[in-house]
Amino acid sequence: MKAFVIDIAKCNGCHNCQIVCKDEHCGNDWSPYAKTQPDTGQFWCSVEERVRGTVPLTRISYIPRIGAQTEALREYAGEVLMPREDGLIVIDPEKAKGREDIAEKFEGVYWNAELQIPQGCTGCAHLLDNGWAVPRCVDACPTDALRFGDEDDLAEEIAQATRLDDDSHVYYLNFPKRFIGGTVVDLAADEVVIGAEVYLKDEDGKVVSLARTDDFGDFIFKQVEPEAYRVEIKAHGFGKKALDADAREADLNLGTIDLSA
Ligand code: SF4
Ligand code: SF4
């Protein structure tokens, strides 16, 4: 079974994968694998930009999306797929004629009204069957964020990965969780507090992580689970400060925390 493994930590948002997917499939008829993709409206590969946090503590994450490679699609419409030993999900444009229901049911599958066929990522099966080791999008990725291969060969990465759909063959490494950050200051002295110990505790009071404020008084906890926490700050010469940090809904900028107050 073939799979994509996407390392979010390596993706720089260049959109190469999306552009070459268009280059490969718009205006090119790769029958019997795929008919030409319309110039607009379809995104077999796309790159979602997620801006997280609030100014001035923000981060941007890029989430490449490759659709149509789910077992749910195979189960629902197996009769219109090309039979393949490598397990790639390739909608046969002849067998799938008139099946608008497939495009309606599955994100990442698009209805081509002109040709009356549902279309989506084919894994570039036409290239793989002609000697390419990887699809166009993977070949064009400059950072190796995008990888492709047999699930057995990628088992180690897959064991640590997450998926957007439980039955998808697109896996993500370093998928963004939550961050919690802030700036510790001594307003009475008009200074930031450097080297303060910042404890992240769960609801049972157990320390989940420890950070120290940097030369700007800033601290950040990255890749924490989306849960409710309590942040405790200790610094020489100040009393302990504690505050709630509920990261269940979104990343959290705790803002300026004054130890002198
Ligand atoms: S494998 Fe091919 S069809 Fe699928 S997203 Fe990549 S370039 Fe597009
Ligand atoms: S080509 Fe690679 S680095 Fe560029 S957006 Fe796609 S996955 Fe990210």
Image: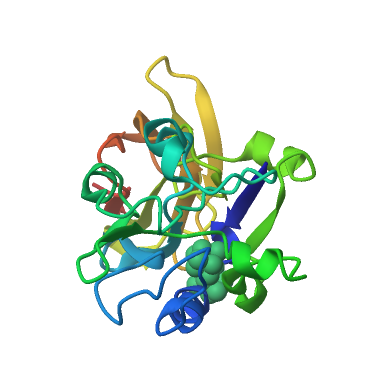
Rendering quadrant holding ligand 2: bottom right
Residue 12 visible: no
Q: How is the image coloured?
A: rainbow
180 left or right of 151? left
- Classify 74 as above or below 120: above
Of residues 261 and 63, the one drawn nearer to the viewer in this rendering? 63
242 left or right of 64? left
Of residues 182 and 228, the one drawn nearer to the viewer in this rendering? 228
Residue for point 30% across, 82% down: 39
Residue for point 45% across, 68% down: 216
Position of residue 12 measured from the top left corner of the image (x, y, whole percent): 52, 73
Of residues 143 and 228, the one drawn nearer to the viewer in this rendering? 143
| Residue 110, quarter of the rendered image | bottom left
115 left or right of 119? left
Residue for point 51% across, 79% down: 24
Number of numbered discs = 0
| Residue 97, quarter of the rendered image | bottom left
Residue 181 visible: yes
The residue positioned farthest toward the top in the image shown: 204
Residue for point 60% across, 74% down: 136
Position of residue 227 measured from the top left corner of the image (x, y, whole percent): 35, 30
Position of residue 203 measured from the top left corner of the image (x, y, whole percent): 37, 19
Quadrant where the N terminus lies? top right
Position of residue 37 measured from the top left corner of the image (x, y, whole percent): 36, 74
